[in-house]
Amino acid sequence: MSLPHAILTALLEKPSSGLELTRRFDRSIGYFWSATHQQIYRELGKLEQAGHIRALPSAQPTRGQKKEYEVLPAGRAELAAWVGRPEDPKPGRDPLLLRLRAAAVAGGVGLEEELVRHLELHSAQLAEYEAIEKRDFPPERRVTRQDRLRHVVLRGGIELETFWTKWLTDTLKELSVSPDRPHRDAVPDAP
């Protein structure tokens, strides 16, 4: 149910065409709510049919010209109502965690290399988020409530990537312990 709300949010920030929306998803909202281009276009049609958005009138209607959409009052009301609805947290579904669990029972090769690759990806994402924070959200630019809300979303991304980089680093260390040596935190047997 959240994709239509992500689209309404993006359109309230700036009326856009479907193509512009997909690009904006790739650069911002997509960091925390991803969608394919087909999903976005399909959802635009549903939102328009529901009376939540409309295509802006074009100065020169021509075949194949991109439509630019704006949110209608019904769409704003739906988004505002959705913001206030209670919703329980969703359990995480990360294939990497399932693969680690599977490796515990079935074995497998290449696990450490995959963990290193994930560490590199999360480290790069963390660096990107931190650069965005430095560029777009210095303390003096967090004046309005809207600025602070956008910043806390970014901080959430920073904290998640910080978690993943630390967890992956710790996991790689844990897996590098030799089976013939006790773990660094192991308590020796009592005499």
Image: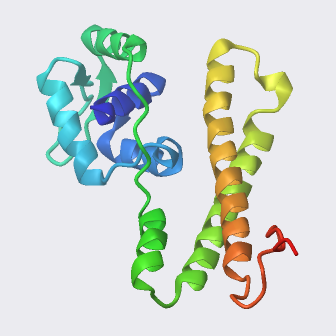
Q: Which residue is located at x 29 percent, y 52 percent?
A: 37
The answer to whether 87 appears left or right of 45 in the picture is: right
* Res 15 seen here: no
Please, is residue 18 above or below residue 180 in the view?
above
Of residues 99 and 27, the one drawn nearer to the viewer in this rendering: 99
Quarter of the rendering containing residue 158: top right
Q: Residue furthest front?
A: 191
Of residues 58 and 144, the one drawn nearer to the viewer in this rendering: 144
Please, is residue 120 above or below residue 52 in the view?
below
Percent position (x, y) of residue 134?
Answer: 80, 42
Of residues 126 and 89, the one drawn nearer to the viewer in this rendering: 89
Q: Which residue is located at x 41 percent, y 16 percent?
A: 83
Q: Which residue is located at x 15 percent, y 31 percent?
A: 46
The image shows a total of numbered marks equal to 0
Quarter of the rendering containing residue 8: top left
Percent position (x, y) of residue 165?
Answer: 69, 61
